[in-house]
Amino acid sequence: MSTTQAQPVRTGVRPGVMLALATIGFAVNFWAWALLSPLATKFTTTLHLSSFQQSLLVAVPVVVGSLGRIPIGALTDRFGGRIMFPLVSLATIVPVLYLGLVGHTSLPAILVGGFFLGIGGTAFAVGVPFVNAWFPPERRGFAVGIFGMGMGGTAISALTTVKLVKAHSMQTPFLITATVLAVYAVVAWLVLRDAPNRVVPSTPLAQRLRATLRLPITWQAAALYAVAFGGYVAFSVYLPAYLKNAYGLAQADAANRMAGFVLLAVVMRPIGGWLADRIAPSRVLAVTFALVITGAVVQAFTPGLAPVGTVAFLGMAAALGTASGAIFALVAQRAPASQVGSVTGVVGAAGGLGGFVPPLVMGSIYGSYHSYALGLALLAVVALGALVLNVLSAGRRRNAVAA
């Protein structure tokens, strides 16, 4: 693939500042992306939705934000984060305002708004190649892990959305989020700079995407991330409904517990990247997927929340966050520099799609059996498949090196 080297646009720019701004941008866009999830139970009551419709409501932004990462990641390889971060943030304002002002009165209207709200979820594919270019290979896992903490934007939504609606109006959280997005877009345009040594591809977008899909690391990381980040997304959007239905918790209490799950996963993500910088990412992933299997099996029996259920969920949160960080350390190590954005887009899409399916499955299972046991058992089976794939892939790499 033909590439050219980007020329320095500014001297004296500190990578830490760029990392901080990228992480804030990721958090702000994820905050917007997750606005519907905390209100799902409210919409279910006011609009008389079924369990499946409730699951669909929170899953639509996830699938759009996931698929959108593929072209957005490739565009970031070409145009850089300095352009793409403000562009994604400004585009996300439109569905946020629509949902807050007029698009929350019927299920079709919410689904339309949720479709375009998915734009906010594509910010992940902007930030990974942007951050990756600012740091040397031996620090990329930790740096990308720090950036990944921006997924805590979903916790901001969980902690504030319901409270703002109750204290003020349905419009309030959407108006506040739109304002923050606008402020960030301006700051990002003025302050963000792409790394001077960023590798800029010169080949057409379609050709780059085809080349990306031929890389073994693309498919390996995509499959693993579909389980790791997909599991995180699934729990972050569906956990309030799960806790309400399975344990009878109030909406606010369920949202607060979901925020705790999210925050622990967020904290563990840079730790996963840091560990993968120092030991083989495959070893980190083997341990984390084993923990997910254990937590899912335990929770399938719906134990009491204090302490067994809480420990099971927090254990899975820590494992999923650590695995997500380790996977992108693996991408940073093995993907060609000019294709990090494209690989990130495909891998990120797989992760988001991994989060799209479980809420629908869980909603359907609960609607049919009034139990989540089968859904959690399926999570354990899928995590076991990821563990086996990880072990086999690591074995093939060792054999290739030995040969």
Image (spheres, grey):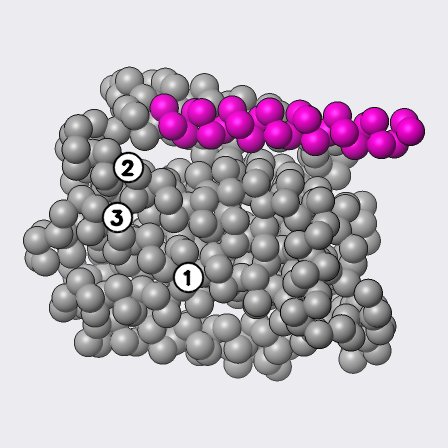
Q: Which percent across, then down, holds residue 347?
A: 59, 50
Q: Is residue 89 left or right of residue 271?
A: left
* Labels 3 and 2: the sequence-earlier one: 3
State the extent of the magenta-drawn residues as a range.
Answer: 377-403
The kind of residue on which mark 1 rests is Val
Dot 3: element: helix
Nearer-N-terminus badge (2/1): 1
Q: Position of residue 31 (x, y in %)?
A: 40, 60
Are the two marked residues, 3 and 2, in contact with CB atoms closer than 8 angstroms? yes
Residue 298: image x %, image y %? Answer: 36, 18
* Distance from the alpha carbon under mark 2 to that under mark 1: 20 Å
Residue at (30, 76) in percent of width and height: 97
The residue nearer to you, when weighing 224 against 235, is 224
- Magenta includes 345? no
Amino acid type, residue under disc 2 in the picture: Met
Question: Disc 3 versus disc 2: distance between alpha carbons?
Answer: 8 Å
- Image quadrant occupied by the N terminus: bottom right
- Mark 1, residues whose alpha carbon is within 10 Å: few (<14), some, or many (≥20)? many
- Residue that badge 1 annotates: 64
- The image shows residue 84, relative to residue 143, as above or below, that is below
Q: Residue at x 45, y 44 (%)?
A: 354
Which label sits on residue 362?
Answer: 2
The answer to which quarter of the image holds residue 366 is: top left
Whole-percent x, y for residue 315 in the image = 45, 27
Instruction: Tell me the kind of residue under disc 3.
Output: Ser
Q: Earlier in the sequence, mark 3 or mark 1?
A: 3
Label 2 packing within 10 angstroms: few (<14), some (14-19), many (20+): many
Confirm whether residue 233 shows in the render: no
Q: Is residue 128 left or right of residue 244?
A: right
Which residue corresponds to mark 3?
A: 55
